[in-house]
């Protein structure tokens, strides 16, 4: 997560109509203020502002802003979800990437953030896909090798990976190809650390989808890694 400022918030849910989940939200999106007790009630809506997260079945989702893209076309017979709700419904209701794609295809998606959003979804079976909305249509970019990369750049019809953040994409590609797509948690965190936007690093997270464990580092404090597990 690279942006001007955040208040990172660990979100853990266990509801009667959804799976156990854990993830990260930014309380600044919810108007949090240490000086205003009432504003702290905003934390109750944090599950619906989760930027990245994982569920008990080993499905993870992350959202990335992209310079271009669109909301989905509106089908009046379908329910409309706002962009942040995509992460929530994915980890609440999907056990695999395939289930997540099928689930999201049944909704209109309305982008409310400053930029449109792409979504990377992965599962414990090694499946991965990136979902983008182009000219109102949902497009699914599947993983073609042993790994997949997303760096705030549209991937659909962009085989040469040209555009904003292409430099970061190439750096990840070099590192992962040299390792045949297999790296440790520590290697992954170091790779993320080396490719943050200068002055805007807020948090880095690695999700182990087999162990259902989240490893997080905050505010550029790369000396400390915090570990959270879904029990």
Image (cartoon, rainbow, N blue to C red):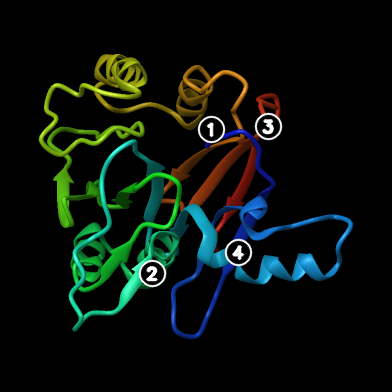
**Disc on the earlier residue, 4 or 3:** 4
Residue linked to disc 3: 219
Task: Please say if the residues under marks 3 and 2 sit with CB atoms less than 8 Å apart.
Answer: no
Mark 1 neighbour class, 10 Å CA radius: few under 14, some 14 to 19, many 20 or more: some
Residue 114 appears left or right of 173: right
Residue at position x 19%, y 61% from top?
98
- 84 or 124: nearer the eye? 84
> Can you tell which quarter of the image residue 208 is in?
top left
Q: CA distance from mark 2 to mark 4?
A: 13 Å
- Secondary structure under tag 4 reads helix
Query: Where does the image place residue 39, in percent across and percent down from the top left?
Result: 77, 66
Q: CA distance from mark 4 to mark 3?
A: 20 Å
**Disc on the earlier residue, 1 or 4:** 1
Q: CA distance from mark 1 to mark 4?
A: 19 Å
> Can you tell which quarter of the image residue 29 is in?
bottom right
State the count of labels.
Answer: 4
Q: Which mark is residue 46?
A: 4
> Can you tell which quarter of the image residue 95 is in?
bottom left
- Secondary structure under tag 3 reads loop
Q: CA distance from mark 3 to mark 1?
A: 10 Å
**Disc on the earlier residue, 3 or 2:** 2
Residue linked to disc 1: 2
Query: Where does the image place residue 57, in percent across and percent down from the top left?
Result: 38, 64
- State which quarter of the image contains the C terminus: bottom right
Query: Where does the image place residue 201, in percent across and percent down from the top left?
Result: 59, 28
């Amino acid at each position: 997560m690279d942006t001007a400022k955040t208040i990172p918030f660990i979100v853990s849910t266990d509801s009667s109509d959804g799976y156990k989940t854990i993830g990260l939200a930014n309380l600044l999106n919810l108007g949090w203020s240490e000086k205003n007790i009432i504003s702290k009630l905003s934390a109750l809506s944090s599950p619906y502002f989760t930027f990245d997260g994982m569920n008990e079945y080993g499905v993870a989702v992350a959202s990335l802003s992209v310079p271009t893209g669109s909301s989905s076309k509106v089908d009046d017979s379908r329910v409309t979800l706002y962009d942040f709700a995509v992460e929530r419904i994915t980890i609440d209701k999907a056990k695999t990437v395939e289930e997540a794609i099928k689930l999201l295809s049944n909704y209109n998606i309305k982008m409310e953030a400053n930029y449109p959003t792409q979504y990377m979804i992965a599962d414990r079976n090694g499946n991965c896909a990136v979902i983008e909305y182009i000219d109102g249509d949902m497009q699914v970019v599947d993983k073609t090798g042993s790994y997949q990369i997303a760096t705030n750049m549209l991937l659909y019809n962009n085989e040469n990976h040209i555009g904003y953040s292409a430099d970061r994409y190439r750096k990840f590609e070099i590192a992962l190809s040299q390792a045949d797509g297999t790296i440790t948690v520590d290697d992954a965190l170091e790779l993320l650390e080396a490719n943050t936007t200068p002055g805007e690093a807020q948090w880095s997270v690695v999700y182990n989808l087999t162990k259902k464990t989240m490893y997080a580092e905050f505010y550029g404090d790369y000396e400390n890694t915090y570990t959270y597990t879904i029990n």
